Amino acid sequence: SSELTQDPAVSVALGQTVRITCQGDSLRNYYASWYQQKPGQAPILVIYANNNRPSGIPDRFSGSSSGNTASLTITGAQAEDEADYYCNSRDSSGNHVVFGGGTKLTVL
Amino acid sequence: QLQLQESGPGLVKPSETLSLTCTVSGASISSSNYYWGWIRQPPGKVLEWIGSFYYSGSTYYNPSLKSRVTISVDTSKNQFSLNLSSVTAADTAVYYCASSSLAPSAFDIWGQGTMVTVSS
Protein backbone atom coordinates (compact mmCIF):
# COMPACT_ATOMS: atom_id res chain seq x y z
CA SER A 1 0.00 0.00 0.00
CA SER A 2 1.11 3.55 -0.74
CA GLU A 3 2.44 5.74 2.06
CA LEU A 4 0.85 8.73 0.35
CA THR A 5 -2.94 8.89 0.31
CA GLN A 6 -5.02 10.68 -2.31
CA ASP A 7 -8.75 10.87 -2.92
CA PRO A 8 -9.54 8.55 -5.86
CA ALA A 9 -11.66 11.07 -7.75
CA VAL A 10 -12.48 14.76 -7.72
CA SER A 11 -14.61 16.85 -10.03
CA VAL A 12 -14.68 20.57 -10.79
CA ALA A 13 -16.85 22.80 -12.91
CA LEU A 14 -15.15 24.43 -15.86
CA GLY A 15 -13.45 27.64 -14.77
CA GLN A 16 -13.72 26.89 -11.07
CA THR A 17 -11.00 26.11 -8.54
CA VAL A 18 -10.15 22.64 -7.33
CA ARG A 19 -7.78 21.35 -4.67
CA ILE A 20 -6.29 17.86 -4.77
CA THR A 21 -4.67 16.63 -1.59
CA CYS A 22 -1.99 14.12 -0.66
CA GLN A 23 -1.48 12.91 2.89
CA GLY A 24 1.47 11.12 4.42
CA ASP A 25 3.74 11.33 7.42
CA SER A 26 6.84 11.74 5.27
CA LEU A 27 5.45 15.02 3.92
CA ARG A 28 6.34 16.59 7.26
CA ASN A 29 10.00 16.18 6.32
CA TYR A 30 10.22 15.90 2.54
CA TYR A 31 9.03 17.89 -0.44
CA ALA A 32 6.06 16.84 -2.52
CA SER A 33 5.86 16.84 -6.29
CA TRP A 34 2.79 16.58 -8.49
CA TYR A 35 2.31 14.95 -11.88
CA GLN A 36 -0.42 15.15 -14.48
CA GLN A 37 -1.04 12.05 -16.58
CA LYS A 38 -3.44 11.76 -19.49
CA PRO A 39 -4.45 8.41 -20.99
CA GLY A 40 -1.69 6.76 -22.95
CA GLN A 41 0.87 9.41 -22.05
CA ALA A 42 3.82 9.66 -19.72
CA PRO A 43 3.34 11.74 -16.58
CA ILE A 44 4.24 15.42 -16.67
CA LEU A 45 5.70 17.20 -13.63
CA VAL A 46 3.50 20.18 -12.76
CA ILE A 47 4.75 21.07 -9.27
CA TYR A 48 8.02 20.28 -7.49
CA ALA A 49 9.41 21.05 -4.04
CA ASN A 50 5.88 21.67 -2.75
CA ASN A 51 5.14 24.89 -4.58
CA ASN A 52 7.37 25.38 -7.62
CA ARG A 53 6.24 25.20 -11.22
CA PRO A 54 8.57 23.85 -13.91
CA SER A 55 9.03 25.95 -16.97
CA GLY A 56 6.05 25.72 -19.30
CA ILE A 57 3.45 24.79 -16.70
CA PRO A 58 0.54 27.26 -16.62
CA ASP A 59 0.33 29.45 -13.56
CA ARG A 60 -3.18 28.18 -12.77
CA PHE A 61 -1.34 25.24 -11.19
CA SER A 62 -0.02 25.90 -7.70
CA GLY A 63 1.08 23.81 -4.76
CA SER A 64 1.31 24.07 -1.01
CA SER A 65 2.15 21.91 1.95
CA SER A 66 1.31 22.00 5.64
CA GLY A 67 2.01 19.33 8.19
CA ASN A 68 1.37 15.93 6.67
CA THR A 69 -0.68 17.23 3.74
CA ALA A 70 0.41 18.55 0.37
CA SER A 71 -2.06 20.17 -1.99
CA LEU A 72 -2.29 20.88 -5.68
CA THR A 73 -4.63 23.70 -6.62
CA ILE A 74 -5.90 24.42 -10.10
CA THR A 75 -7.38 27.91 -10.29
CA GLY A 76 -9.76 28.26 -13.20
CA ALA A 77 -9.77 24.64 -14.33
CA GLN A 78 -9.77 24.06 -18.08
CA ALA A 79 -11.11 21.12 -20.02
CA GLU A 80 -7.56 20.05 -20.85
CA ASP A 81 -6.80 19.70 -17.14
CA GLU A 82 -8.95 16.57 -17.00
CA ALA A 83 -6.41 13.88 -16.12
CA ASP A 84 -5.02 11.70 -13.37
CA TYR A 85 -2.88 13.52 -10.83
CA TYR A 86 -0.23 11.84 -8.73
CA CYS A 87 1.77 13.17 -5.83
CA ASN A 88 5.15 11.80 -4.87
CA SER A 89 7.80 12.30 -2.25
CA ARG A 90 10.26 10.34 -0.17
CA ASP A 91 9.31 7.69 2.34
CA SER A 92 10.11 8.06 5.99
CA SER A 93 13.61 6.63 5.49
CA GLY A 94 14.39 9.38 3.00
CA ASN A 95 16.04 6.97 0.59
CA HIS A 96 13.04 5.71 -1.31
CA VAL A 97 10.52 7.39 -3.57
CA VAL A 98 6.81 6.86 -3.10
CA PHE A 99 3.83 7.78 -5.24
CA GLY A 100 0.32 8.43 -4.11
CA GLY A 101 -2.58 6.38 -5.39
CA GLY A 102 -3.62 9.06 -7.85
CA THR A 103 -6.67 11.30 -8.19
CA LYS A 104 -8.83 11.27 -11.29
CA LEU A 105 -9.91 14.84 -12.02
CA THR A 106 -13.06 15.35 -14.03
CA VAL A 107 -13.81 18.81 -15.43
CA LEU A 108 -17.57 19.23 -15.79
CA GLN B 1 17.49 19.22 -24.42
CA LEU B 2 17.48 16.10 -22.29
CA GLN B 3 15.63 13.14 -23.75
CA LEU B 4 15.16 9.59 -22.55
CA GLN B 5 14.22 6.52 -24.57
CA GLU B 6 13.39 3.09 -23.23
CA SER B 7 14.11 -0.05 -25.22
CA GLY B 8 13.80 -3.78 -24.71
CA PRO B 9 11.59 -6.80 -25.30
CA GLY B 10 7.86 -6.26 -25.14
CA LEU B 11 7.19 -9.85 -24.10
CA VAL B 12 8.89 -11.81 -21.33
CA LYS B 13 8.11 -15.32 -20.15
CA PRO B 14 7.20 -16.01 -16.52
CA SER B 15 10.19 -16.76 -14.27
CA GLU B 16 12.59 -15.09 -16.71
CA THR B 17 14.41 -11.77 -16.36
CA LEU B 18 13.01 -8.53 -17.74
CA SER B 19 15.77 -6.33 -19.15
CA LEU B 20 15.27 -2.75 -20.30
CA THR B 21 17.65 0.01 -21.31
CA CYS B 22 17.22 3.76 -21.09
CA THR B 23 19.27 5.79 -23.56
CA VAL B 24 20.01 9.33 -22.46
CA SER B 25 20.61 12.15 -24.92
CA GLY B 26 21.25 15.81 -24.28
CA ALA B 27 23.11 15.32 -21.01
CA SER B 28 25.74 13.10 -19.49
CA ILE B 29 24.51 10.32 -17.26
CA SER B 30 27.56 11.05 -15.09
CA SER B 31 26.49 14.61 -14.45
CA SER B 32 26.02 15.64 -10.84
CA ASN B 33 22.99 17.66 -11.92
CA TYR B 34 20.76 14.62 -12.36
CA TYR B 35 19.16 11.77 -10.50
CA TRP B 36 17.85 8.87 -12.60
CA GLY B 37 15.14 6.32 -12.07
CA TRP B 38 12.75 3.65 -13.25
CA ILE B 39 9.01 3.80 -12.64
CA ARG B 40 6.33 1.40 -13.82
CA GLN B 41 2.56 1.43 -14.21
CA PRO B 42 0.48 -1.75 -14.61
CA PRO B 43 -2.46 -1.34 -16.98
CA GLY B 44 -5.18 0.74 -15.34
CA LYS B 45 -3.19 1.07 -12.14
CA VAL B 46 -0.99 3.58 -10.39
CA LEU B 47 2.63 4.62 -10.71
CA GLU B 48 5.17 2.54 -8.81
CA TRP B 49 8.75 3.60 -8.22
CA ILE B 50 11.21 0.79 -8.96
CA GLY B 51 14.56 2.35 -8.14
CA SER B 52 16.92 5.26 -8.65
CA PHE B 53 20.57 6.14 -8.69
CA TYR B 54 22.75 9.18 -8.30
CA TYR B 55 25.86 10.09 -10.29
CA SER B 56 27.85 9.28 -7.16
CA GLY B 57 26.93 5.63 -7.58
CA SER B 58 24.38 5.37 -4.78
CA THR B 59 21.49 3.18 -5.84
CA TYR B 60 18.16 2.72 -4.09
CA TYR B 61 15.41 0.22 -4.75
CA ASN B 62 11.77 -0.14 -3.85
CA PRO B 63 11.83 -2.42 -0.80
CA SER B 64 9.02 -4.52 -2.28
CA LEU B 65 11.13 -5.27 -5.37
CA LYS B 66 14.63 -5.07 -3.98
CA SER B 67 15.34 -8.80 -4.04
CA ARG B 68 14.64 -8.94 -7.79
CA VAL B 69 15.87 -5.59 -9.12
CA THR B 70 19.22 -4.40 -10.38
CA ILE B 71 19.90 -1.01 -11.97
CA SER B 72 23.20 -0.67 -13.78
CA VAL B 73 24.92 2.12 -15.68
CA ASP B 74 26.98 2.19 -18.87
CA THR B 75 28.62 5.60 -18.98
CA SER B 76 30.36 4.84 -22.27
CA LYS B 77 26.97 4.48 -23.96
CA ASN B 78 25.20 7.06 -21.78
CA GLN B 79 22.66 4.42 -20.82
CA PHE B 80 21.24 2.86 -17.71
CA SER B 81 19.47 -0.44 -17.46
CA LEU B 82 16.87 -2.28 -15.44
CA ASN B 83 16.92 -6.00 -14.71
CA LEU B 84 13.94 -7.53 -12.94
CA SER B 85 14.27 -11.24 -12.27
CA SER B 86 11.72 -14.01 -11.73
CA VAL B 87 8.91 -12.06 -13.34
CA THR B 88 5.26 -12.95 -13.06
CA ALA B 89 2.11 -11.59 -14.66
CA ALA B 90 2.04 -8.98 -11.91
CA ASP B 91 5.11 -7.39 -13.50
CA THR B 92 3.19 -6.60 -16.68
CA ALA B 93 3.32 -2.83 -16.96
CA VAL B 94 4.45 0.22 -18.86
CA TYR B 95 8.00 0.86 -17.74
CA TYR B 96 9.32 4.43 -17.73
CA CYS B 97 12.80 5.78 -17.22
CA ALA B 98 12.97 9.30 -15.85
CA SER B 99 15.34 11.94 -14.60
CA SER B 100 15.26 14.53 -11.87
CA SER B 101 17.18 17.79 -11.98
CA LEU B 102 14.94 20.20 -10.08
CA ALA B 103 14.55 18.51 -6.71
CA PRO B 104 15.09 15.06 -5.22
CA SER B 105 12.40 12.62 -6.38
CA ALA B 106 10.81 15.22 -8.70
CA PHE B 107 11.05 13.52 -12.06
CA ASP B 108 10.87 16.28 -14.64
CA ILE B 109 11.88 14.36 -17.75
CA TRP B 110 10.27 11.03 -18.68
CA GLY B 111 10.76 8.59 -21.50
CA GLN B 112 7.71 7.70 -23.55
CA GLY B 113 7.41 4.38 -21.73
CA THR B 114 7.58 0.83 -23.00
CA MET B 115 4.93 -1.82 -22.45
CA VAL B 116 6.22 -5.14 -21.15
CA THR B 117 3.90 -8.13 -20.98
CA VAL B 118 4.77 -11.20 -18.95
CA SER B 119 3.18 -14.20 -20.58
CA SER B 120 4.09 -17.65 -21.80
Image (spheres, coloured by chain):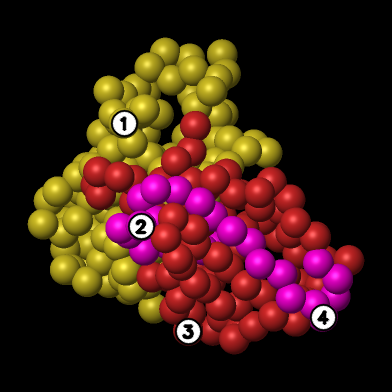
Residue A42, visible in the rendered structure:
no
| Residue under pointer 4 | A15
For the residues labelled 1 and 3, the Cα–Cα distance comes to: 33 Å
- Colour of the chain lettered B: yellow
Chain letter of mark 3 equals A
- Residue occupying the far left of the picture: B56
Same chain under badges 2 and 1? The reply is no
Residue located at (34% from left, 22% from top): B85
Label 1's element? loop
Specify the chain shown as red: A
Between disc 1 and disc 3, the foreground one is 1
Mark 1 belongs to which amino acid?
A: Pro
Task: Name the residue rendered at 28%, 38% in the picture.
Answer: B61
Instruction: Read off the chain for label 1.
Output: B
| 2 and 3 marks in contact (CB < 8 Å) | no
The residue that mark 3 highlights is A55
Q: Which residues are magenta?
A: A12-35
Residue type at mark 3? Ser
Real-space CA distance between mark 2 and mark 3, rounded to the nearest whole angstrom: 26 Å
Q: Is residue A14 magenta?
A: yes
Callout 3 and callout 4 share a chain: yes
Q: Nearer the viewer, mark 4 or mark 1?
A: 4
Give the residue pinned by disc 2. A28
Q: At label 2, which amino acid type do we have? A: Arg
Q: Nearer the viewer, mark 2 or mark 3?
A: 2
Mark 3–mark 4 Cα distance, whole angstroms, equals 23 Å
* Residue B46 seen in render: yes
Which chain is mark 4 on?
A
Check disc 3: other Cα within 10 Å, few if <14, some if 14-19, many if 20+.
few
In what element is the residue under mark 3?
loop
Left/right of residue A54 with respect to residue B24 in the rendered view: right
- Say few, some or many: other residues with alpha carbon within 10 Å of mark 4 (under 14 / 14 to 19 / 20 or more): some
